[in-house]
Image: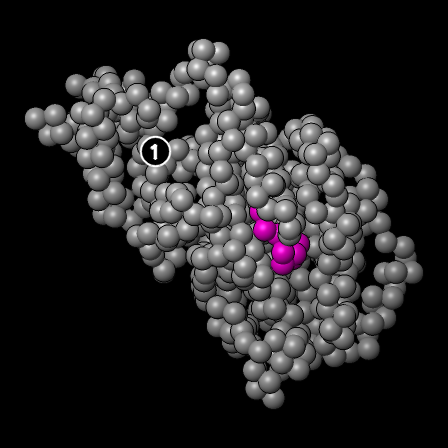
Amino acid sequence: MNLQTQLKKSFNLDNFRLGQQDIINAVLAKKDTLAVLPTGGGKSLCYQFPAVSLNKLVIVISPLIALMKDQVNSLEKKGIPAGALYSGQTEEQKRLVFAKINLGGAFILYLSPERVQKEGFQKWILQREIALFAVDEAHCVSQWGHDFRAEYSELKILKKLRPDVPILALTASATPTVLDDVAKNLKLVKPERLVHGFYRPNLYYQVENCEDDDVKDAWLLQAIKQFPTGRVLVYCGTRKVAEETSAMLQEKFEKVDYYHAGLGAKERSRIQDAYINGDLRILVATNAFGMGIDQADVRLVVHYQMPANIDSLYQEMGRAGRDGDPSTCLMLYSKKDKGLQSFFIQNSQADKTIKDLKWRNLEALVSYSEGGECRHAEILTYYKDAQRLKKCGHCDSCLPNSDRKILEVIPQKVAAPLKLTKNQKKYKFVVGEEMSPQQQIVFRNLKNWRKEKANELDVPAFVIFGDKTLRELAQVNPQNIEELQNIYGIGEAKVEKFGTEILEELKRSLD
């Protein structure tokens, strides 16, 4: 039976999505494989299909119990044997899973990374015929990734125990550096590297700078009003803010709840089931929710607080529009959010090298938030996707008048000019409303210089400088290196890389 026929028979799908068939072919050829597919791009099929095609056991390492249960339920509905082993199960439930495996043939077994470390399970692995080990959310393996987990770094035991079994490492978001680290840590042998599909043309990307939570609330309420149907996900940086935001929304909308890791296991399961079944429409959550959850009709994803880095932002935005229909992703950015993420980094137990990377990742996200270039194009360049764009036509930079853009509703206290506080005036200054005509010319010239430099270095423009830095350069017009170091967003490394060129560009613009 050819792959296309098997796809239709077992999964009732007419065609493979972008990249799926290349990944499956590599797995069937028994090659270790590094695969990157976008959130909603069909990663799970890449290990489910080989189990059915080869009629053998496939073991999947998954980070979340919720993900395992969701996948097992989905497979059982298709008539594909599957099961999961996780904490909280009874002995009888575990025995039933092993009994099904002992029947032979195709079976997809989901495990936590911790279970792989158990001596009894390792002995069991040695005795089984296994077609594939699949490591889902593989970026968790890498200390350079946005969600490193120590238990994932121990998965190198798989290759030591069973060097004959290929490993498929899957993720939705990983930079080239992270992929190198995943391959090294999992001891992959000459892995195929297949990176596909960071471009999501059905998503509209929008970022709004907010000076306080009142402004954020206004944006959030307007966003939900513009999307009266379909599901809504609202991401918050802390449990407290998730609960407070949920309470605020419950006063104005129906079917609202919150989710975070501080809830009990039963309560988390209840909320997730309610979300999956449609009993909840609006879910306010921390990053504890959503990994691997596949709900097709999420029309709106709002980041009420900025996440730690672009990888987290991209992955969470990618939960919108999995059915391919138009959806909007809105990030509400404020200085306070940067302070929160800075606090997390400062209090991290990671060593200096990892902390330095976290600082750089945070600064990159801040610059992305404050940038004015095509947001999809910047993402594609950031991930070194083979597909590149100059203008996408569906982000707040390329199409500011889109009917998918969330419209601004300014709270009363901000709308009244006489009541503006010092901080609010500073915010207006930041967004560039007070530049003189000459400064605007300098700002445009600096943006052109940044674009050319980004193309030359093959990096996103925000990695060079954010718009806020360019505005301040245009307004302050530093005359030497010492003055340059006082500009927002310019540290020693940036001065060393670009200082001379910036000063020359400023001089040219004012001649």
Kindly identify the residue that appears in the image at 45 percent across and 60 percent down: 197
Q: Which residues are magenta?
A: 293-300
Q: Quadrant of residue 465?
A: top left
Q: Write down the residue under mark 1.
A: 466
260 falls in the magenta region: no
Kindly identify the residue that appears in the image at 53 percent across and 52 percent down: 327
Is residue 307 or residue 375 the one in the foreground? 375
Quick check: 494 above or below 31?
Answer: above
Q: Tell me the colour scheme of the image.
A: one colour
Residue, far left: 511
The location of residue 498, given as percent across then percent down, is 23, 32
Relative to 422, 480 lies left or right:
left
Q: Main secondary structure of the magenta part?
A: loop
Q: Quadrant of residue 262?
A: top right
Q: Is residue 230 visible?
A: yes
Q: Residues within 10 Å of mark 1 (few under 14, many from 20)?
A: many
The location of residue 201, given as percent across then percent down, is 45, 57
Relative to 506, 261 lies left or right:
right
The location of residue 189, given as percent across then percent down, is 49, 65
Kindly identify the residue that appears in the image at 77 percent across and 50 percent down: 279
Quadrant location of the C terminus in the rendered image: top left
Quick check: 425 above or below 72?
Answer: above
Quick check: 132 above or below 221?
Answer: below
